[in-house]
Image (spheres, grey):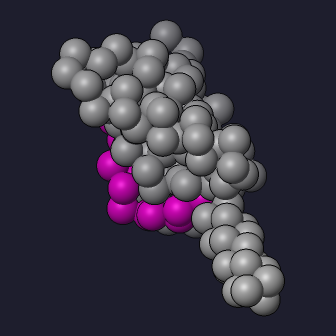
Amino acid sequence: MMLLALLAFSVGIGFARHSGATTVQQKEIQALKLEVAKPDVKWETWLKYGQVLEAAHQYKDAAVAYQQVLKTDPYQPEALWHRAFCLGSALRDTEQFFSFMRNTVDVDPKLAKKVFEQPYAAIYLAEARFQTLKQDAIAGSMD
């Protein structure tokens, strides 16, 4: 019986480590998941949900949460910044990152310029289309 309990505990610890989230983070994620499922949820709740997911290294879900913020407030700088990180650095989703950054250049060129200055953006700047976006962000940030 003790061996079964120890085995169950070990499997549970392995699963917790694999998910990248601590027990406290998992509880917070679950609580916020219930909050964002409610109708008329505020963008601040989605932002907090994204931040907790990002801290737990659940970048794909965090990017979705940040997108929900941006549906309500397309100029929300924290959501813009963190969605860029999730797509560009953590997930390395070139197409989504390009699409997102094209929009970000239009919405907040100064923030887009700062994103392109991040070390993780260097790999994308090898492509001409990203170089053009960076130049557009620089030009737009001078206005």
Q: In the orientation shown, which residue stands out farthest toward the top? A: 143
Which quadrant of the figure has residue 39?
Answer: top left
Q: 104 and 60: which one is in front? A: 60
Residue 118: x and y in percent read 71, 44
Q: Is residue 18 visible?
A: no
User: In percent of the image, x 37 and y 44: which residue is there?
Assistant: 64
Residue 33 on the magenta segment = no
| Span colored in magenta | 89-103
In the visual, does 41 lie left or right of 135?
A: left
Residue 101 on the magenta segment = yes
Residue 122: x and y in percent read 67, 58
Q: 73 and 48: which one is in front? A: 48
Q: 3 and 106: which one is in front? A: 3
Q: Is residue 12 above or below residue 138?
A: below
Q: 4 and 105: which one is in front? A: 4
User: In percent of the image, x 36 and y 62: which residue is there?
Assistant: 95
Q: Is residue 64 above or below residue 37?
A: below
Q: How many marks?
A: 0
User: In percent of the image, x 55 and y 15: which residue is there?
Assistant: 142
User: In percent of the image, x 44 and y 50: which residue is there?
Assistant: 61
- Give the dominant element type of the magenta stretch: helix, strand or loop: helix
Q: Is residue 65 above or below residue 70?
A: below
Q: Quadrant of the N terminus?
A: bottom right
Q: In the orientation shown, which residue stands out farthest toward the front? A: 1
Residue 78: x and y in percent read 55, 24
